[in-house]
Image (cartoon, rainbow, N blue to C red):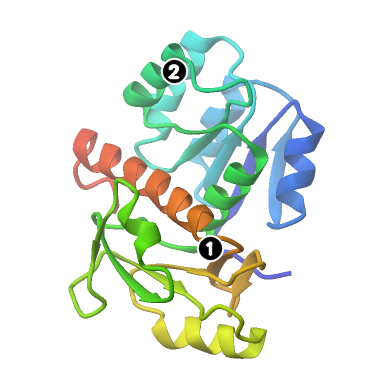
Amino acid sequence: MVSIPGEVAVLARSEAVLVALVDVLPVCSYVRADDAEMLTHWGDDPLTTVIVVDSLGDPREFAQVAARVSRRKPIVVLAPAGVTEGLAALARATGVILVEGLRDLVDTVRLLAYQPLPAGRRVAVGGDLPHTVAATPLLPCGPDDDADACLVVAPFGSDLGTAWKTVLAAEREVTTLACVLGHDGLVGGRVPCYAYPEQAVGALARVTAYAEWRDRRHPGARG
């Protein structure tokens, strides 16, 4: 199993959430509960880098704890019934990352677990389909610019060996992720790979929004 720089902690009631994450990530800690005390514990745990929650319990208590924890590490909240006005307000106040389905949950956690937070919205796009980024809130830039993140889209129809080489050759010392059509996972044990461009773009948009919240609310929180 590929090691990651820290642990993914899961505070869940749903078996589906645990199964979805264990299938793709070395989830090291989990509790079947909606216990704010565990959220506090993992927030203070230096080994934990990402926290996943599928039930808020007492919303007021959760908000108080989440606002503190999000200053230091991301909290991803599954909202399968959709993002209500109340959840949107919670996210604005606490910085939690809202996702509406298991695929978006896995896509987002994979990026958070294996890559640093982007420093801004400038995205270098390499390979095919650069127009997929232009349709998002992210601001694309040319591959030679001083980018904050790098999205590598492997050539359509290439074999996996060629696709992996394309991705690793384009890897940068910034947030890097890839699209290899039809394949989800990791490239080189460190670059998150998505089966479709919209998955990669969606994950990057969510993670970028969290990074902006943290910088805006708590300058210097990146370390």
User: Residue placed at 66% from the left, 84% from the top?
Assistant: 160
**Residue occupied by mark 2:** 63
Residue 127 occupies quadrant: bottom left
Helix or strand or loop: what does disc 1 sit on?
loop
Q: Are marks 1 and 2 in contact (CB under 8 Å)?
A: no
Tell me residue 180's x, y (percent). 58, 72
Q: Mark 1 belongs to which amino acid?
A: Pro
The image quarter in which residue 57 lies: top right
Quarter holding the C terminus? bottom left
Query: Cα distance, mark 1 to mark 2?
Result: 27 Å
Is 165 above or below relative to 203?
Answer: below
- Residue 164, quarter of the rendered image: bottom right
17 to 155, vertically: above or below: above
Instruction: Count up the numbered dots.
Output: 2
Question: Residue 139 location in percent, x, y?
Answer: 24, 55
Give the residue drawn at x 50%, y 49%: 46
The N terminus - image quarter: bottom right
Residue sitting at x 53%, y 53%: 199
Q: Could you say which disc has been placed on residue 5 in the image?
A: 1
Q: Secondary structure at mark 2?
A: helix
Answer above or below: position of 56 versus 196: above
Mark 2 residue type:
Ala
